Image: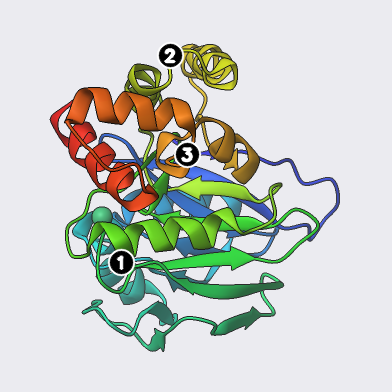
Amino acid sequence: MSRSLFCSPAPGTLQVSALPAFADNYLWVLHDDTHAVVVDPGAAPPVQHFLQQRGLTLSALWITHHHADHTGGIAALRAQADVPVYGPALECIPQRTQALAAEDTLQLNHPPLRAQVLHLPGHTAGHLGYRVAGPVPWLFCGDTLFGCGCGRLFEGTPAQLLDSLHQLQRLPQDTLVFSAHEYTQANIRFALEVEPDNPALQQRARDCAALRAAGQPTLPSSMALECATNPFLRCTEPGVIRSVQARCQVAHSDELSIFTALRAWKNRF
Ligand SMILES: [Zn+2]
């Protein structure tokens, strides 16, 4: 099953399609009407089916981090097409051909696109984000930023993940956020515990419930929406500080102390 999120108004226009995989992953495909780039191919069959159905040629694989649900389909896809595999220099990525670091730029002709590489440590040590230039910028952020949430700390410190989220907050507010998992509704339930009186969050809960009831993804979101509703981006808001101090026995009110306690609270939620 695949879902095209953006219709293509003219031949050759770049679009993004969401391929659901496993329980709640999205494999994101950037494509025009002839070529495709796949972000985090955790499984090959949904990608193979989509390419065949659309008559698309695979051009490249972009990997955000080493976890199996983001890399498991690389071998099978490369067995069919000898495409480059872009991934973090700091991590062990199967069949990686291009090792990437912060500030690297990717330029592709088919499909035509340009992306800037961001280093976003925290969930994993070498985690990357891909920021695609365009009239509306796109961000493929893997397991760093989720709809109304953020990734777990497997290989990094709270300070590293907070710094990575700050990098993302500084992107243009209209940047569309393509996270790798459909976690938004569960994250909203937690966010409402933290900020029950946030009207933008209450509206997002209604909007996402309607999308899921209609079988639609809640993604992409936008940086503006995340900044208004995602508690992990709001650790300097008085309401978030009050909730965390009340629930987590935190004496300090600085952003890192609040973020650290909030992440630990979410792990228990
Ligand atoms: Zn992961």
Disc 1 residue lies near ligand 1 with CB under 8 A:
yes
Which residue occupies 48% across, 13% down?
A: 209
Q: Is residue 40 above or below residue 215?
A: below
Residues packed near mark 1 inside 10 Å, few (<14), some (14 to 19) or many (20 plus): many
Give the residue furthest to the right: 10
Q: What amino acid type is highlighted by mark number 2?
A: Pro
Q: How many marks?
A: 3
Circle 3: residue type: Arg
Q: Mark number for residue 133?
A: none
Ligand 1: image quarter: bottom left
Tell me the number on the disc at residue 234: 3
Residue at image position (33%, 18%) is: 193
Q: CA distance from mark 3 to mark 1?
A: 25 Å
Residue 196, picture quadrant: top left
**First along the sequence among labels 2 and 3:** 2
Q: What residue is drawn where x is 26% and y is 34%?
A: 23
Q: Secondary structure at mark 3?
A: loop
User: Which residue occupies the extreme front position in the image?
Assistant: 251
**Where is residue 58 drawn, in percent x and y?**
51, 69
Upstream in sequence: badge 3 or badge 1: 1
- Quarter holding the N terminus is top left
For marks 3 and 1, give the one nearer the viewer: 3
Residue holding disc 1: 65
Residue 174 higher or lower than 191, as above or below: below
Residue 66 visible to the viewer: yes
Q: Position of residue 224 (x, y in %)?
A: 64, 40
The residue at label 2 has a CB less than 8 Å from ligand 1:
no
Q: Type of residue at label 1? A: His
Instruction: Measuring from the top left, give residue 51's x and y in whole percent.
Output: 51, 56
Q: SS of the residue at dot 2?
A: loop
Read off the residue under disc 2: 196
Q: Secondary structure at mark 1?
A: loop
